[in-house]
Image (spheres, grey):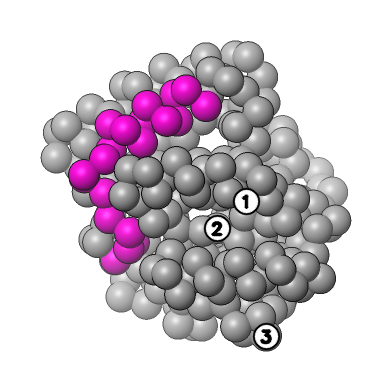
């Protein structure tokens, strides 16, 4: 089983998200939508009524909606762990790897409250860059949020389940990352051929690189007929 999602859904990436949606619909997929309330502190979702209407319409049409951090941007910090999360794993976007439990839970609650106010469903929470601290899963369990994922695993905090469901995605920041992620994405198809469920993650920034556009469309064509539109099916 293959699940497809579009990350960083925000007015910031309006056109790119619509393009990716079109590609997914062409192969019969309704991808999950990982929605950022205020991307990089500059694109508040609540201020764009037309975009909120669009998201509600997509949700009504069967697209699952996930809270994807809040700002998708890390606060400043220090230490080796912060450096790895913010400079190696991400370009300063591993937001929920930077917060302790009180600060992180407050931001989580802020995002959930916003989704309620905007009448958007919440099918789960995915931390930016798939990076988190240990407090997140218990916090999600306490709030009845029964889906979260990282690069390798999908989790149901309420049920206490974990499934090895590796993500296939591209990294576009540098030429080296583009080359290595394309190589990985091609090899990672072997997980599914071996009978393992996988996740395909599309990032809007990928659409600005013609090579990654071609690779993404080829990946979706490969997945056609073997996909699920619900994360519950991953378990």
C-beta proximity under 8 Å, tags 2 and 1: yes
SS for tag 2?
strand
Q: Residue at x 58, y 49 (%)?
A: 18
Q: Position of residue 91 (x, y in %)?
A: 72, 36
Q: Position of residue 95 (x, y in %)?
A: 69, 53
Residue 96 part of the magenta-drawn span: no
SS for tag 3?
helix
Q: Is residue 136 left or right of residue 154?
A: right
Q: Is residue 215 left or right of residue 9?
A: left
Q: Which mark is residue 34?
A: 2
Q: Is residue 216 above or below residue 62?
A: above
Q: Residue at x 53, y 71 (%)?
A: 57
Q: Residue at x 82, y 48 (%)?
A: 77
Q: Is residue 132 left or right of residue 194?
A: right
Which residues, given as a range, are shown in magenta? 213-232
C-beta proximity under 8 Å, tags 2 and 3: no
Could you say which is closer to the camera, residue 232 or residue 105? Answer: 232
Q: Residues within 10 Å of mark 1 (few under 14, many from 20)?
A: many
Residue 218 part of the magenta-drawn span: yes
Q: Mark 1 sits on what residue? A: 8
Could you say which is closer to the camera, residue 187 or residue 52? Answer: 52
Q: Name the N-terminal-most of marks 1 and 3.
A: 1
Could you say which is closer to the camera, residue 207 or residue 84? Answer: 207
Q: Mark 3 sits on what residue? A: 117
Q: Name the N-terminal-most of marks 2 and 3.
A: 2
Q: Is residue 210 above or below residue 97?
A: above
Q: Is residue 109 left or right of residue 199?
A: right
Q: Is residue 184 above or below residue 59?
A: above
Q: Is residue 105 visible?
A: no
């Amino acid at each position: 089983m293959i699940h497809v999602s579009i990350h960083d859904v925000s007015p910031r990436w309006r056109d790119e998200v619509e393009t990716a949606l079109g590609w997914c619909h062409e192969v019969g997929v309704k991808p999950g939508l990982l929605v950022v309330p205020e991307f990089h502190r500059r694109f508040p979702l609540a201020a764009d009524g037309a975009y909120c209407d669009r998201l509600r319409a997509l949700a009504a049409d069967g697209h699952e909606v996930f809270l994807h951090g809040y700002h998708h941007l890390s606060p400043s910090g220090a230490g080796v762990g912060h450096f790895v999360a913010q400079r190696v794993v991400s370009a300063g976007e591993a937001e929920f790897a930077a917060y302790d439990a009180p600060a992180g839970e407050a931001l989580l609650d802020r995002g959930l409250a916003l989704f309620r106010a905007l009448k958007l469903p919440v099918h789960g929470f995915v931390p930016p860059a798939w990076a988190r601290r240990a407090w997140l899963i218990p916090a999600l369990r306490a709030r009845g949020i029964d889906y979260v994922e990282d690069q390798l695993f999908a989790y149901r905090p309420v049920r206490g389940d974990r499934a090895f469901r590796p993500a296939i995605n591209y990294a576009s920041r540098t030429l080296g990352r583009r080359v290595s992620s394309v190589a990985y994405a091609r090899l990672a198809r072997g997980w599914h051929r071996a009978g393992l469920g996988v996740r395909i993650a599309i990032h809007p920034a990928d659409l600005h690189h013609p090579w990654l556009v071609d690779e993404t469309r080829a990946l979706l064509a490969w997945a056609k007929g073997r996909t699920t539109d619900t994360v519950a099916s991953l378990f």
